[in-house]
Every structure is written in structure tokens, then in C-alpha cells.
Amino acid sequence: MTRTIPIAPVRKTLVVEASPARAFEVFTAGVDRWWPKTHGIGSAPVRESIIEPFVGGRWYARCEDDREVVVGHVRVWVPAARFVVSWEINAAWKPDARVAFASEVEVRFAAEGATATRVELEHRNFERMGAEGGATMRSQVDGGWPKLLELFAQSAASRP
């Protein structure tokens, strides 16, 4: 009998100077404004990052060679409150469409006073990648999400 050992999720929280609706919009529809073009999994540089705004929609990158590379798919979509996407990237940072091996990212948005929003990100289910691959991915995203969230916060705080 094979036993899966859970790997702790990565959790990050920050407060941004924006309403929950604006923070949600910047994180999702505005992902191309803040997600670094250097953070792609395709064979060519990223030209554009896109999250389609519905359950089943893709989170993908359009690359400079016109190919599209899927990062994941939207599993939950509640505008201004939360969304969940699969993370269809393996521990070697290559696309992997096998749903059974995908980790998952949930982002929640909650008003924090009159002018700010608490954003809570949880990246979980690393054990689906296997013990070694899951531990590797967890370690890498634990170090990567803070930098990405800082870029998001800067974009959310800027006026449209």
C-alpha cells in the first residue's frame, strides 16, 4: 500500500491599498501588468499573461513565438472575493496537463478597513507531484511568491 505524505501548503498574506474589487481585477484581468515576462514556462519569452475569467478558463502565457503555454485552469471564480486555479507545472518547471499531478493556488480578497484589502494566497497539494518533486516545488514557490506578490501590490496600489 502506498501512502501519500502531505506537504505543507505555502501561505502568504499581504495588505494592498485597493478595494477588494480592484485587487481582484488587478490580480486576474491585470495579471499581464505585474507578472514578470521572465517568469514563463514556454520555450520562448512571455509576451502576455492571461487568466480567463470563468470556471474552466485557462491561466496561460502567450509567448513571443505565438505559442500558448497553459499554467493552469480556473476552478473557482468569485469576483472581488476569491479564485482558485490549478498549477499545471511540474517540479522541473515544465507544463504538465495531468490534473492528478497539479497543485493548486487559491487567492482570497477581504476588505481591511476603508481603503485596503487583505490578500491571502495559499499554494497547496504539492504531494500530488510525489515526495521529491512536491518538496522541490514547495521550496521554490515559497521563495518566489513574496516577490510576485510585491509586484502585484505595487500594481494594485497604482491608479488605473
Image (tube, rainbow, N blue to C red):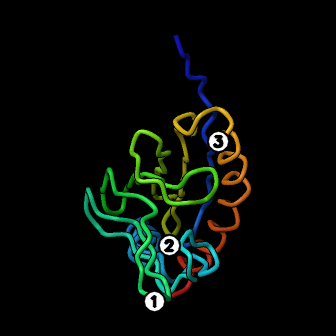
User: Which of the pair 12/94 is nearer the observer?
Assistant: 94
Q: Amino acid at mark 1?
A: Pro
Q: What residue sits 62% from the left and 66% below the top?
A: 149
Circle 1 residues within 10 Å: few <14, some 14–19, many ≥20: few
Rounded to the nearest angstrom, the CA distance separating label 3 from label 1 is 40 Å
Q: Position of residue 89 (x, y in %)?
A: 53, 55
Which quadrant of the structure image shows residue 44?
bottom right
State whether residue 126 is above or below residue 29.
above
Tag 2, which secondary structure?
A: loop
Q: Position of residue 147 (x, y in %)?
A: 70, 67
Q: What residue sits 50% from the left and 88% below the top?
A: 64
State whether residue 142 is above or below residue 159.
above
Tag 1, which secondary structure?
A: loop
State whether residue 101 is above or below residue 44.
above
Q: Which residue is mark 2?
A: 18
Tag 3, which secondary structure?
A: helix
Q: Which residue is mark 1?
A: 160
User: Which of the pair 19/59 is nearer the observer?
Assistant: 59
Q: Position of residue 51 (x, y in %)?
A: 38, 70
Q: Amino acid at mark 2?
A: Ala
Rounded to the nearest angstrom, the CA distance separating label 2 from label 3 is 36 Å
